[in-house]
């Protein structure tokens, strides 16, 4: 910032000397025409400075309107009426007034800048740098919104579309809108325990990650409909911890632990949380469970194979049509857990779906031990199925499945 101020000061000094030196030299000239020419040049320079200061916002229009006539008046006084002799003391006065003005204008401009300008902006970066923490898939997620909203306009009771809208809003951290989406699902399908659990989750985020009040009521409704609902049991544990009921929280999480397969991601973390709660509540630790054997490489959290288009349906697809190959949970939300996007001209295609291809951080392929793989030709380029799309769906497969074959062989009516 100091360097910039120094440069500005030097520029102001240069402008001042540019105006003042001709005035000083004018005292040594003996011919009136030369003096008149110098005065006109000075006037032009000073007027240009005033206009430039007005343009750059350093002077207001009122200040400019006041300074310009004064400058013109001085010019009329300085310009000779036709052949006077050497300048007298009285004729030197306007010159010194001009020199004074040429010095005061930059000083005045600097003062105005510090009064109404933003000196701190000098330290600001020239270009704003993009956030390094932004999810690289956020634009893809946001791009899904118009398609989902259009689907809901056409089919207001489409639970799959409302569920996807809720997931997208949660991923974008637009929690009030996510809560509205899940509330709609509970109205359309009041017997869905998962809908009430999702609604409780969104409400808790709206309340700043607090579950007291309405979120706890929604958890209770979910567990009444399905006492084994995984999400409801997990949230119930947190709600009980908030209320200080550690033993009840432990009981809820132990029910959940009994429902989860040992190899599922997050099970070890849940055991640690239960152990911490037991310690805080002064309860003895549970007997050590036998740790499951390491998952072999073939059971890694991915599914691979090949997707192809049936020869019988080739006439219904254009080479530029969009193709989605994605994994979806067998039981639970229908939102894609991992997705590959290509075109018909790229078929057949070898695919390997894993967590790196997930749509949201909250919904990972590795969180679901069993999935189905869908290959769909979308005529509209939308991830939501529509009449006229072509589709192939696998049977339920476990994570780690290799060499899966999917043929797109059905037209959606």
Image (cartoon, grey):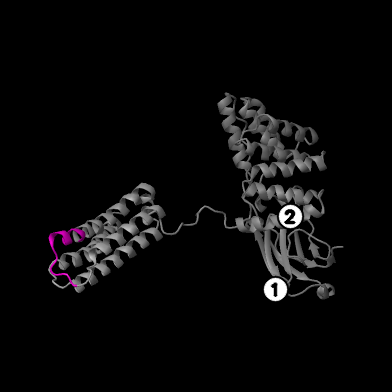
Residue at 40% in and 60% down: 55
Residue at 52% in and 52% down: 133
Residue at 71% in and 39% down: 199
Residue at 78% in and 51% down: 160
Quarter of the picture containing the N terminus is bottom left
Q: Position of residue 178 (x, y in %)?
A: 69, 44
Q: Residues within 10 Å of mark 2 (few under 14, many from 20)?
A: many
Under circle 2, the secondary element is: helix
Q: 333 or 106: nearer the eye?
A: 106
Q: Which residues are magenta?
A: 83-94
- Is residue 358 visible in the rendered image? The answer is no
Mark seen at residue 346:
1
Residue denoted by label 2 = 148
Q: Position of residue 68 (x, y in %)?
A: 34, 59
- In the image, residue 239 sits, relative to residue 315, either above or below, namely above
Residue 274: in magenta span: no
Under circle 1, the secondary element is: helix
Task: Tell me the distance, in whole angstroms, between the alpha carbons under discs 2 and 1.
Answer: 26 Å
């Amino acid at each position: 910032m100091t360097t910039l101020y120094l440069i500005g000061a030097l520029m102001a000094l240069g402008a001042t000397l540019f105006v003042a030196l001709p005035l000083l030299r004018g005292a040594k000239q003996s011919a009136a025409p030369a003096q008149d020419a110098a005065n006109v040049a000075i006037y032009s320079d000073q007027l240009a400075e005033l206009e430039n200061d007005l343009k750059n916002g350093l002077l207001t229009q009122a200040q400019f309107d006041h300074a310009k006539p004064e400058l013109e008046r001085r010019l009329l006084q300085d310009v000779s009426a036709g052949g006077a002799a050497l300048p007298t003391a009285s004729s030197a006065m306007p010159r010194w007034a001009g020199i004074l003005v040429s010095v005061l204008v930059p000083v005045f401009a600097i003062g105005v800048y510090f009064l109404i300008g933003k000196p701190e902006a000098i330290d600001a970066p020239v270009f704003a740098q993009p956030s390094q923490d932004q999810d690289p898939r956020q634009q893809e997620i946001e791009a899904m919104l118009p398609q989902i909203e259009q689907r809901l306009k056409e089919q207001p009771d489409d639970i799959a579309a409302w569920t996807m809208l809720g997931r997208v809003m949660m991923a974008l951290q637009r929690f009030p809108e996510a809560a509205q989406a899940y509330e709609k699902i509970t109205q359309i399908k009041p017997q869905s325990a998962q809908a009430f659990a999702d609604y409780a989750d969104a409400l808790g985020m709206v309340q700043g990650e607090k579950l007291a009040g309405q979120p706890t009521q929604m958890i209770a409704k979910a567990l009444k409909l399905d006492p084994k609902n995984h999400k409801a049991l997990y949230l119930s544990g947190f709600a009980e911890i908030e209320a200080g009921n550690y033993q009840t929280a432990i009981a809820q999480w132990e029910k959940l632990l009994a429902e989860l397969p040992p190899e599922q991601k997050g099970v070890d973390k849940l055991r640690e949380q239960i152990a911490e709660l037991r310690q805080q509540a002064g309860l003895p630790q549970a007997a050590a469970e036998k740790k499951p054997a390491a998952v072999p490489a073939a059971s890694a959290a991915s599914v691979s194979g090949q997707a192809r288009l049936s020869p019988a349906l080739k006439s219904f697809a254009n080479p530029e049509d969009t193709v989605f190959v994605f994994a979806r949970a067998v039981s639970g939300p229908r939102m894609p857990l991992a997705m590959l996007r290509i075109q018909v001209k790229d078929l057949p295609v070898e695919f390997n779906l894993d967590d790196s291809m997930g749509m949201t951080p909250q919904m990972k392929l590795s969180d679901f031990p069993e999935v189905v793989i869908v290959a769909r030709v979308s005529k509209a380029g939308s991830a939501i199925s529509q009449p006229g799309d072509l589709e192939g769906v696998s049977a339920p497969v476990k994570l780690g499945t290799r060499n899966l074959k999917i043929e797109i062989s059905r037209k959606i009516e």
